[in-house]
Amino acid sequence: MMKKILVIAFLLFCFSALNAQMAEKFTPALMEAKFGAKQVYNSDSRSFTLDIVTKDIKPMSSPNLVQVDKHLVQFVLISNSAFSQTDTSSARQHAELQGYMQYELDYITGEAKLKISDIEKNFITLNGKLFLLWYYKMPADNNSVLQQINLSTLCFGQALNLNSPVTKGETLEENKDLLIKIAQTLKMNNFKIDLNALYKELQNQ
């Protein structure tokens, strides 16, 4: 079952690699904390973070994939020249997020040839930040992953996508709630985070 689940994670990783540009580079780091973990993205001059509040978290072998309360969650950051760093208007963000979703769906159905169905999408706002929630059903012959859910937003001209496979015994609602719980902790900073100082701070909280 794990191999089939990781197929989705691999596809998203490939999308990220194919569309990476020589723009601002953010390096991810998953840092242990007393409350669970903090996902950090650092560039030379800026950063953003997400908190994973849980007593049960386990990093997996695939890049940026963790198990949270028995649910798999992946963090994918995509850099693309089509994403504007200066025009952050609502209209532009709506268009870019929808464009990213459609590109990824085209890749999944075209290159990967997965026969997904019942695609749903909904724009939501979390703490004043626009996100695109979108999900779909996996092929009927996939006995392990029933649906795939994504929650996407824009950070400094990059698309950040949180995603989770809905497996047997799980529901779309509980996986959605988990992604939203993590996403609403997003903090964007106009400075580079000192990881050593942050580690000490997280251990003392």
Image: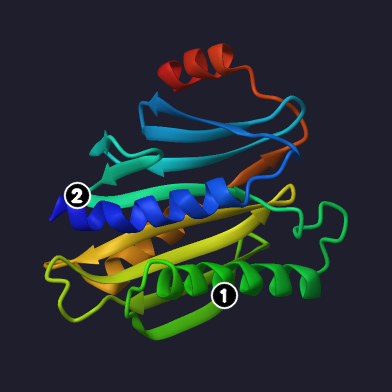
Q: Viewer-proximal residue, 22 or 192?
A: 22
Q: Answer with left or right where residue 17 lies relative to residue 171.
A: right
* Residue 114 vertical placement versus 193 (above, below): below
Tell me the tag on residue 137. Answer: none
Q: Position of residue 45 (x, y in %)?
A: 77, 27
Nearer to us of marks 2 and 1 is 1
Q: Quadrant of the C terminus?
A: top left
**In this view, 111 is above or below 67:** below
Q: Can you identify the residue that label 1 sits on?
A: 102
Q: Is residue 142 left or right of residue 64?
A: left
| Residue behind mark 2 | 70
Q: Quadrant of residue 114?
A: bottom left
> Residue 60 appears at what percent x and percent y?
27, 37
Dot 1 crowding, Cα within 10 Å, few <14, some 14–19, many 20+:
few
* Side of 93 relative to 102 (left or right): right
Q: Where's residue 169, x and y in %?
A: 11, 67
User: How many numbered tags mark residues here?
Assistant: 2
Q: Residue furthest bottom?
A: 118
Q: Amino acid at mark 1?
A: Gln
Which residue is rendered at x = 47% and y = 51% of the image? 14
Calculate the distance from the C-alpha at mark 2 to the C-alpha at mark 1.
29 Å
Q: Where residue 52 sits: x, y (%)? A: 40, 42
The image quarter in which residue 136 lies? bottom left
Q: Nearer the viewer, residue 97 or 19?
A: 19
> Mark 2 packing: few (<14 Cα in 10 Å), some, or many (20+)?
few
Mark closer to the chain start, 2 or 1: 2
- The foreground one among 39 and 118 is 118
Identity, as a three-letter code, of the amino acid under mark 2: Lys
User: In the picture, which quadrant includes the N terminus?
Assistant: bottom left
- Secondary structure at badge 2 equals loop
Q: Residue at x 61, y 59 (%)?
A: 153
For residue 77, say whether it is visible: no
